[in-house]
Image (cartoon, helix red, strand yellow):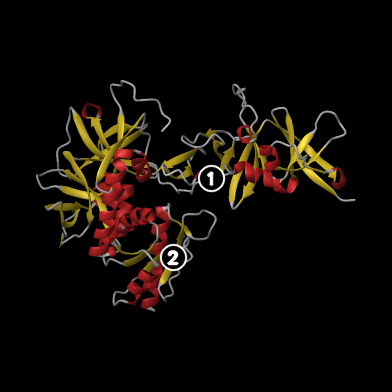
Amino acid sequence: MMVDPLEQKQHASIVVMQVGETRFGLIVDEVFDTEEIVVKPLSKRLGSMSEYSGATILGDRAVIMILDPNGISKSVANVARSVERLLDEQSAAIGAHGAAAAAERTSMLLFNAGGEQPRACPLSLVTRLEELDATRFEPTARGLVVQYRGRLMPLASMGGDIRREGKQPVLVFSQGESVIGLVVDRILDIVEEPLDIQIGNSSSGALGTAVLKGVLTEVIDIGYFLGAADPNWAVAAAQLDSQRVRKRVLLVESHSFFRNLLAPVVTAAGYDVTIARTAEEARARLKSSIAFDVVLADADDAQIAVPSAQKVIPMSSRADTEAVPKSDRHALLSAIASAVRQKDLGEAA
Amino acid sequence: MSTREFVTFRIGDQTFGVSVSEIHDVFRPASMTQVPLSGPDIAGFLNLRGRIVTAINARSRLGLKSLVKSTGNLPLAIGVERGGESFGPIIDEIGEVVRIDETALEQNPVNLDATWSWVSRESVASTTASWSSWILTGAGAEEAAAA
């Protein structure tokens, strides 16, 4: 990249990326925030540049480039060959083990919070990982808060103690204007594995137990703790509670980016998500004995047209269509909820 | 006698014209995003009413010497569309819409520089001394975009 060589700095931020099995760090000057964006493809005139996967327009109207970790790693010559080999191995492994299992891998954040047993939640739900100075935590009538990026962030614990001095690891969650910090004892790791909750757990605050990296891990119901910390989140959580019978959603999406973006969002909202990557796969799924309540179909890809009696919600990454925008998770979730309601009413009548 | 309408603009000392039907916008973007590693003909990305426009460095594309230093003024771009994509060649100054009699249009002179004969279809010698310009037809903008 055309950036000055790294100066001798005391502090540098490093963005850690993973391509296949290879991890590498990108030294950056400053980290701003995470944002949900709609990636627009680059002009064909720039198509040969593998460093970028696209561009997008931010809220302040600035155009920014989206880096492609795969392309960047390839441009670093020494890494390229091993990465390519790993990707080949990986795709071969996917072929052997069946595409569906690989497609449903979820990035999970592992941490300790009250107790030795590791706990986990989907990484995509977490806005940011922070280490905050515990002396800046201030007590209020509703519990501890901290001044964070110009806002007051309520802090909640998942069982562990909140430190009063030193550095406190915090998982930051944001939803619209509101932000909540969940305090953890220690952040352990990020793993990418199929999320298979084996022992359902009815106790509040946990979805169940799964084996991640060979270790029994309690999968946290993040919504429960967020609801405890902020009543507005509790309202959202209550809506989820009313859907105790998990509705089945078939997600038909050809792009892995959107699959990875949408599947955890819909799963986190309390639906059983099955992924189909092609129209054929979707048809096969629909023919099987499992009945789906809602089909989320990619309207951008003309090849994916699901012929079925099921309620189909078209979604698009473009803003100029009638379809639900993929990047707007609130619109997406409310579309699913209203489709489920309509279906239930239809069955009751 | 039929006439054609052209929008004239200036890059460096040279006046150019593009058919009015080819130009969607003339705009002064609020900011330009640089694209590291891109070729010299790509000036950057612009945001035009929520669309990402690829800005073309027209000076470099036409082999004109680049400005030694930006005058601090924001660039002026003309918005053209090719193959479903938006492009914005950066120009120095916008002129006016001129109506030119078809008979006044002439073929490119055979000794025209290859770079320019590529982007120019016809030329016209104006009766006024202030401009003597090569008419860049719409194809010119496309070719200018082809790095």
Residue closest to the far right: B1
Front-lying residue, B99 or B141:
B141
Q: Which mark is residue A45?
A: 1
Image x and y of residue A48, in percent: 47, 45
Q: Which mark is residue A58?
A: none
Q: CA distance from mark 1 to mark 2?
A: 34 Å
| Subunit ID for the residue under disc 1 | A
Q: Nearer the viewer, residue A184 or A34?
A: A34
Chain to which mark 2 belongs: A
Q: Position of residue B58 (x, y in %)?
A: 63, 35
The part of the image, by quadrant, that contains residue A7 is: top left
Q: Mark 1 touching mark 2, by CB under 8 A?
A: no
Please tell me which residue is depicted at 40% across the width and 54% down the height of the picture: A330
The quarter of the image holding the N terminus of chain A is top left
Q: Residues within 10 Å of mark 1 (few under 14, many from 20)?
A: some
> Looking at numbered disc 1 in the image, what kind of residue is underneath it?
Arg
Image vertical order of residue B101 relative to residue B13, above or below: below
Instruction: Give the farthest residue toward the left.
Output: A116
